Image (spheres, coloured by chain):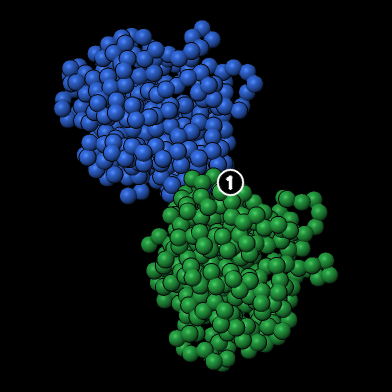
Chain colours: A green, B blue
């Protein structure tokens, strides 16, 4: 069974079925990037409708026990995540309310500095702000996982050290293996280990590189090297796979309402469009190759279980309210 | 024990203590008039803070069982109500989400026609709209009481007949006893009886009149006459008492953001200010006179129990999710 720490895009029944064919038991979805309070409630409503309409194969999970039960029934557990904090409308009291509505993972910021933290793309990373500390305390209390993937390395380090609960870099790679602003430096990965947290290794080509995208063996070797840095208990999978994503989705994700210009996120002016999936991962169900791939590069069955789902479950159990 | 179907204003510890001195076991408060989605979430957050800060004497109730337990512990049960539908942002999917956050009573409209229904102050009452029917179905499903107090009599009649669950006129009087646009005609009260619903008799002078405000005996005689119209199982108390209300509160309540002019609500240009409370009800704790007053005008102990709390509890049990 695989738990994927982050996917995005427009899920549908085909996506759910493909994920199940790939033996995915749980996935954290992206319910919003720049959506404000009301739009985020809309999004939660739509996710409920989608899961109700596909109740035979998908169900929203609120606890680690839910995930175990749903996956055990052969269905896909949906963990509601947001890749930005816009849903909270800069209001500390809304954290608890969104937690009650099932939100379980929220990234401190998406690409841009905000009132909580600096982003991986800012020239200067502010570090965690006063409000950022308040937010993490509140997310810890309310049972929402702090996601630091697009957060700057300085702010990430602050947040990892400040959080009383394990945190996650749900979808990124080690910067020492593939240098990219979106990837995490070794000091961050060491702090993550000390915090009891987790990094979900990504398959998004722009932050993974062609070499690790060439074969499943190469990608699993990258995971092994990440384990050497962060430790076997602190590495999982967070593919960053998107479903049914088209140009308007990329435009919204990258530009939101914050610029009249163009922003490329992890892409570039030279390669502005949709990045090709890894060569070994053309179809969604190819995600199922990961488990065998990890064994093939030398992980023991116990280690494979930790990377594919055990580490995520441990973090979820520590963070989510039961 | 008294259940008050509607109060408003800025509650504080003094108000909670005064209500307890008046033997009030539960009260539906007004968490919003014109507050939008985000502002309504703010308001829920503030109500949680207020109840947390006064946890020894007040607690938010979500079920009829909660009310019985909280009142049984000598505390005040807070039922979260809104006097308008603005919190839903014209989004059907937000009904379920607000219900999960503890909202238990929502008035279809406050003084003005909206997308759901006509108001008591419109020249033409549209009746219940298409969206209005959808909303009532959703509120029935989600466990939120449909409040029809400021709704036009025509729309009220439509709603009472359409709702599959009992509805409430949480704070109004019988128009045949004191004619006022805010009060309910006998056909509405008969329909309310057939629906299994309830009217909470008000003490707000502008819709009660000086005579019924003069003595507790007069007011309880009004209740008796209301029982003659609606039936002993369908009358309760909904004082419409406000706490710490000042001019900016009246301005917000009456004008919200919908006019640059002046609106008087149930008041008038001749008497624009705060209406004096009934002569028998100068202090909040005088609400405790109601129970004895009802017995004094000839209600049996069983009838007094129905009017003071039993009827509200029956409606709450039928409507709220358990």
- Looking at this view, name the residue that lies furthest to the front: A187
In-image side of A250 versus B51 (left or right): right
Say what secondary structure mark 1 lies in. loop
Relative to the observer, which residue lies in front, B241 or B220?
A: B241
- Residue located at (28% from left, 22% from top): B285
Q: Is residue A47 above or below residue A229?
A: above
- Residue located at (59% from left, 62% from top): A156
Measuring from the top left, give residue B154's x and y in whole percent: 48, 28
In-image side of B240 versus B288 (left or right): right
Q: Is residue A296 above or below residue A206?
A: below
Measuring from the top left, give residue A256's x and y in whole percent: 71, 54
Relative to the observer, which residue lies in front, B174 or A313?
A: A313
Residue identified by numbered label 1? A89
- Looking at this view, name the residue that lies furthest to the top: B270
Q: Is residue A135 above or below residue B317?
A: below
- Residue located at (39% from left, 37% from top): B50
Q: Quadrant of residue A263?
A: bottom right
Measuring from the top left, give residue A7's x and y in whole percent: 60, 69
Graded by Cα atoms within 10 Å as few (under 14), some (14 to 19) or many (20 or more), the crowding at tag 1 reads some
Query: Dot 1 falls on which chain?
Result: A
Measuring from the top left, give residue A286's x and y in whole percent: 61, 82
Q: Quadrant of residue B159?
A: top left
* Residue B254 showing in the rendered view: no
* Residue A167 showing in the rendered view: yes
- Residue located at (45% from left, 86% from top): A302
For the C terminus of chain A, the quadrant is bottom left
Relative to the observer, which residue lies in front, B219 or A224?
A: A224
Q: Quadrant of residue B4?
A: top left
**Figure label count:** 1
């Amino acid at each position: 069974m695989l738990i994927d720490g982050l996917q995005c895009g427009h899920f549908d029944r085909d996506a759910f079925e493909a994920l199940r064919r790939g033996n995915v038991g749980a996935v954290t979805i992206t319910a919003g990037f720049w959506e404000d309070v009301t739009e985020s409630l809309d999004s939660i409503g739509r996710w409920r409708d989608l899961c109700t309409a596909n109740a035979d194969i998908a169900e929203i999970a609120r606890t680690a026990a839910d995930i175990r039960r749903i996956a055990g029934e052969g269905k896909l557990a949906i963990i509601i995540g947001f890749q930005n904090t816009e849903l909270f409308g800069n209001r500390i009291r809304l954290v608890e309310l969104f937690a009650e509505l099932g939100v379980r993972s929220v990234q401190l910021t998406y690409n841009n500095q905000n009132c909580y933290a600096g982003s991986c793309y800012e020239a200067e990373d502010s570090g965690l702000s006063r409000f950022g500390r308040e937010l993490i305390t509140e997310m810890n209390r309310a049972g929402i996982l702090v996601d630091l993937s697009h957060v700057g390395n300085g702010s990430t380090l602050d947040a990892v050290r400040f959080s009383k609960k394990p945190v996650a870099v749900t979808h990124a790679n080690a910067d020492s293996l593939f240098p990219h602003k979106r990837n995490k430096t070794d000091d961050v990965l060491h702090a993550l280990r000390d915090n009891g947290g987790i990094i979900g290794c990504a398959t998004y080509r722009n932050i993974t590189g062609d070499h690790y995208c060439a074969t499943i063996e190469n990608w699993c070797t990258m995971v092994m090297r990440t384990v050497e840095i962060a430790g076997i208990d602190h590495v999982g999978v967070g593919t960053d796979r998107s479903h049914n994503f088209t140009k308007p989705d990329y435009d919204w994700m990258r530009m939101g309402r914050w610029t009249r210009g163009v922003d490329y996120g992890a892409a570039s002016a030279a390669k502005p469009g949709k990045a090709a999936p890894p060569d070994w991962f053309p179809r969604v169900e190819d995600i199922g190759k990961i488990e065998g791939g990890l064994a093939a590069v030398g992980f023991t069955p116990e280690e494979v279980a930790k990377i594919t789902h055990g580490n995520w479950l441990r973090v979820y159990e520590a963070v989510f309210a039961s």
